[in-house]
Image: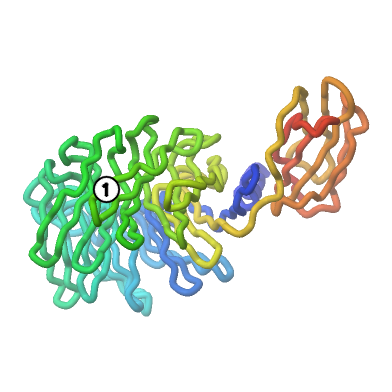
Amino acid sequence: MKKYHVLIIAFFFFGIGAGRAQYNVLLNFDNTNGAYPNGSLILSGTTLYGMTIEGGAHDSGCVFSFNTSGNVYTDLFDFDGPNGAIPAGSLILSGTILYGMTFQGGASGYGCIFSFNTSGNIYTDLFDFNGTNGAYPNGSLILSGTTLYGMTSAGGANPDGCVFSFNTIGNVYTDLFDFNGLTGGRPLGSLILSGTILYGMTETGGVHTEGNIFSFNTIGNTFTDLFDFNDTNGGFPEGSLIMLNYKLYGMSLGGVVNNSGCIFSFNTNNNLYTDIFDFNGTNGEYPAGSLTLSGRKLYGMTQKGGPHIFGNIFSIDTNGSGFKNMFDFDSVNGKIPLADLTFSGSLLYGMTEFGGANGDGVIFSVDTNSTTSIGNIASISGTRNIYPNPNNGQFTIKSSVASGQSSVNIYNVLGEKVFTETLRSAQGDNTIDLSNQPAGVYLYRVLGEDGGLVGEGKVVIQK
């Protein structure tokens, strides 16, 4: 019964508060089908593709698909160490071919570049890192024509990682640039390409040892350190950049006034850096992934902070105004998201590395057009208690307010009010009958005579 209770909450939990987007857990990882996803999902038609860093048949991670039409999950390929282990970053799709990298494993144990043909489910280890040519790639690849570009977080001529290219015609690998600490170190995100210019970030190194933003011109292989983080303006970025016209947008993990990270823009025309929003713990903390752009609105996640300290989903305008906390993770519905969101219509798809019914992470969706109708209400003095919980639809609410009567409103997962009643005693037991409602999770609110909030919470109906 306890497991059933957890599963119900995981599948039907919704955010409380004005304007919160509708959130649904689509899949709970359970180690057998994969565990601890820390990359992003990619979408092709109705199929999402992604990876987990552990779990699967050999506990070394897997490549999976998830059909959003029917919510059908398929473990496509299991890493075993020699063919790669701990796949990092995200996949990219070219035709029927998925390309990706593993952080470890392969012939030398330093990771590999691989392809997976979805037509026939054919896996190929294309290239093995050996330390000298790079080691431990942690980000994703990008594709331009027949050339893949990427970075390793270590190795190369120095121990600080490198920028590389890989031509899929002939499988030709080229170490293009080696970081040396001063030029940056430990790049953990991915590159983006604008014309012949690659843009990226390093987590450490640079002038102040807290990472930098750089460009690399593929014509002439010219590296330029564009901006150095110094803690005051941000520090230790782990995600990737996105570009809108001539402006780059990104996030730093730490730094700024609250040491909780920030959202920034960088104008490539004049190299002007602008801190457009600072996290403070309450509104999120330590963003580790990248931003997703839709029109002039940015969407992203933090891995910590919020009321449950397990991170949140947010949106913000590109000018830094209009920040909105869309959803707070609470562990049961997932926790510690480390990657990006993927748009499909009004839906955002994403994953959390931990949490969910089994603690191994979840796949979720957020409908940006659907919000609950349950607004914030000022609190008043009083107490309430509800029992039993879970129940079969019949339960008791005990309420106490300083004066006058109290009432209860109950909402379903869509934010629709399904029950309201004036409590028969302001300071006593009141029996509630919701046996005509389907099983699921409901939000109840006990209100005082003046409309002030006495208390609220979740009630679980099991049948």
- The reply to whether residue 281 is in sight is yes
Q: What residue do we see at 10% from left, 45% from top?
A: 180
Residue type indicated by callout 1 = Leu
Relative to residue 96, is residue 269 drawn left or right?
left
Q: What residue do we see at 84% from left, 46% from top?
A: 419
Q: Mark 1 points at which residue?
A: 272
User: What is the x, y in percent for residue 338?
Assistant: 40, 47
User: What is the x, y in percent for residue 358?
Assistant: 52, 46
Relative to residue 407, is residue 81 drawn left or right?
left
Q: Is residue 145 above or below residue 322?
A: below
Q: What residue do we see at 42% from left, 50% from top?
A: 319
- The reply to whether residue 357 is in sight is no
Q: Nearer the viewer, residue 302 or 333?
A: 302
Number of marks drawn: 1
The residue positioned farthest toward the top in the image shown: 402
The residue positioned farthest toward the front in the image shown: 270
Q: Quadrant of residue 341?
A: bottom left
Q: Is residue 146 above or below residue 430?
A: below
Secondary structure beneath dot 1 equals strand
Relative to residue 353, is residue 242 drawn left or right?
left
Q: Quick one: label 1, few (<14), some, or many (20+) residues within 10 Å?
A: few
Q: Quadrant of the N terminus?
A: top right
Q: Which of 73 and 241 is in front in this view?
A: 241
User: What is the x, y in percent for residue 229?
Assistant: 25, 39
Relative to residue 324, is residue 156 drawn left or right?
left
Q: Nearer the viewer, residue 70 or 22?
A: 22
Q: Is residue 281 above or below residue 327?
A: above
Image coloring type: rainbow
Q: What residue do we see at 6% from left, 50% from top?
A: 157
User: What is the x, y in percent for residue 106?
Assistant: 21, 58
